[in-house]
Amino acid sequence: MTTTPLHRTPLPITAVGYEQRASRSAMTCRNRCGDACFKPEPNRTDHGHVRDEIAKVVQRRALLKGAAATAGVGALVLGGGSLRPAAAAPLPAAPDAAALSKDMSKAAFRPVPPNTRDALVVAQGFTQDVVIRWGDAVLPGAPRFDPQAMSAEAARQQFGYNCDYVGVLPHPTKRAKSLLVVNHEYTSDDIMFPASYDDEAKKEISMYNHGMSVVEIKRGRVEGSWLRVQPRFASHNRRIHLDTEFEVTGPAAGTDRLKTSADASGRTVLGTLNNCAGGTTPWGTVLSGEENFNQYFGTEGTPNPEYAASYARYGLAASTSRGWYTVQDRFDLAKEPNEPFRFGWIVEVDPSDPQSTPRKHTMLGRFKHEGANIIVSKDGHAVAYMGDDERGDYLYKFVSKKKVATGTGANARRRNLSLLTEGTLYVARLEGNGYDATTNADCDGTGTWIPLASDTESFVEGMELADVLIDTRLAADRATTADGGGPTRMDRPEDVEPNLVTGRVYAALTNNSRRGTQFPVDEANPVGSSTTKDSGEPTVTPGNNNGYVLEMIATRGDHALDTFRWKLFLVCGDPEAQETYFGGFDKSQVSPISCPDNVAFDSVGNLWVSTDGNALGSNDGIFRVPTQGPERGHVQQFLSVPRGAEACGPLITADDKSLFVAVQHPGELDDASFENPGSTWPHTDDYPRPSVAVAYRRA
Ligand code: FEO
Ligand code: CA
Ligand code: CA
Ligand code: CA
């Protein structure tokens, strides 16, 4: 299967056209997820599809809408050095106030056109600065970064590789400062090391480039700008890495499957891995998802056959691309068969206390956690929404047993820090009620949260409580509603985040190359092939290549209840393609968007979406989308990231003046190397450096 991009602007190094992942480079696939896309999907169940037998195709209206959608497109503008269709038709003259507004939520801007520049391009009228780069000092005394002299010891003190989640929290004691909390998801070993490093040195240095960083920042001279505080003046800076001690909480803590030769208690784990997205809690901590943890484990021995089903469901296998078992025995599946059960959790970090022990919460289940985001239910329970990022895997939520304590005193704080240790874990089933299968309008229906376990009991027949939490995927496969329906296999659930302005929840479902073939289409997953145009001739590519954004509405606005309504808010892709849908907004007025990944909200409830792996042939970016009113669904590209990069974060500060973006894996293109870089962004060196940047209104 190959893809023909809509905007054929070849990258200098091949980045499109390989088998499973239309635009993400093969190098990114190997480094990020251990080539998950090339392997059979671990969810072998056949249940859980939205019932499409009741779908009614409203063909006539589809035709009418299709005609309207294609009217008025096709204007050409110059951008990125080649002729290409405009990202959107020219906007009417913006009112001055909106055109000049410093608020990201209100500012009118012309969308950034699709491009393949090696630059962080922000909308006209805005600018951006790099706040911190890979290798910059986090701890006082950290060695100056030198790619020719990297070491594990240096990495433990420096900003790690491949920044992903970005949180900005108040500093606990200094009003002028804030705390930037960042995940370092994975390393791109092929491009971060000069040829002089041998494989074992690379593995060891890479290990310590994973984890998280806490970095003090302060406002810059221009409103909306931010700078990092020098480490010697930053008492709260912290580097969390593979030697950092984590406490395991919840019902699976201390159970046999979490015990290893290094930890007979089953309650203490060293390190966190593949931390992807996350969320900031109302009580001032950061949650971070351990995602593709399986790729770090392997063996030359024979894995325990008792664990075969569990290992297979999580993609754990003898041969992995990372091969870390040659450096640390605990990554050897034959020597330490329980070590992989100690990864794949939601971790909680309290950045206000640099001495605090971060925790892994078993009550929130073990899977390839993208992240977790909290909303407080009507009667005060903490509800965490979560996605399991794998083709055909599920959406989850957790409802705390205890209520969120209000106030800022020590008692309230202590109580809130225990909220994620007791409660109920659920998996989602979605049912449709009929839709327009040509335009994907009216993809909506109802949903049920199927309980899997509480802190005292398993709700899955034949599985013990600890096993439900450790093998959450296997538990979810068996779970059913009262009338026998299983959970719904989705197209790679990424960030799932409540919009705190409206109470609606938005899930990015990034893509699924096998939707329409191995996975039948249904009302919640309606795209089995996508259309791109090149030289005027449409090309149809199998699979859901551009993804969706799903909107979930809790019954009576109560997130603790076990039912909800849902709607596909965006069916992403080329606005000219009939299958795309933008919340009902005029398709001739929106930016093309592909592969939504992380979501965030500003103070008025606009959705901000970052993308990973644009399948339309352009660089990834960040897009603003109103969710309410006449502008609902008006997708506008606010920035684009450099070549080979994906856009992560994003985060809009509470005053709407700043947008933080983590530029992950710039230059990670097939055939790139340190000596032959696919990007040199942020252009401070002759090789790329993943970095966090902040965009704001130009002074
Ligand atoms: Fe790390 Fe689901 O992307
Ligand atoms: Ca419907
Ligand atoms: Ca991502
Ligand atoms: Ca988010």
Image (cartoon, rainbow, N blue to C red):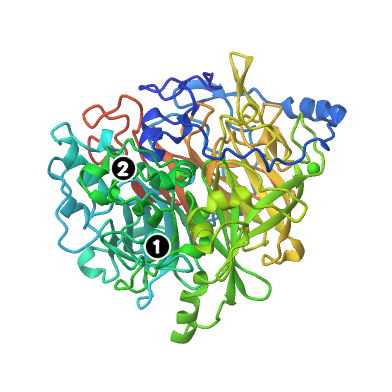
Q: Is mark 1 within 8 Å of ligand 1?
A: no
Label 2 within 8 A of ligand 1 by Cβ: no
Q: Where does the image place residue 405, in percent across and percent down from the top left?
A: 55, 80
Please give the residue where the numbered disc 1 appears in the rendered image.
256
Image quarter in which the C terminus is found: bottom left
Residue 563 shows up from this direction: yes
Q: Is residue 122 above or below residue 365?
A: above
Q: Amino acid at mark 2?
A: Thr
Residue type pointed to by label 1: Asp
Q: Is residue 610 above or below residue 652?
A: above
Q: CA distance from mark 2 to mark 1?
A: 31 Å
Q: Earlier in the sequence, mark 2 or mark 1?
A: 2
Q: Residues within 10 Å of mark 2 (few under 14, many from 20)?
A: many
Name the residue nearer the viewer: 516 or 600: 516
What SS does tag 2 mark?
loop
Regarding residue 599, the answer to whether it shows in the image is: no
Could you say where residue 429 lies in the image, as x and y percent from the top left? 69, 50
Disc 1 crowd rating (10 Å Cα; few below 14, some 14-19, many 20+) is: few
- Disc 2 marks which residue? 187
Viewer-closest of 559 and 391: 391
Circle 1 SS class: helix
- Displayed quadrant of residue 583: top right
Against 15, residue 471 (above or below) is below
- Count up the numbered dots: 2
Query: Residue 49's quadrant in the figure?
Result: top right
Query: How far across and down, in percent of the image, does residue 394 sit?
Result: 59, 47
- Judge whether 367 appears above or below 381 on screen: above
Residue 676 location, quadrant:
top left
**Residue 431 as seen in the image, left or right of residue 415:** right
Q: Residue at x 29, y 40 (%)?
A: 299
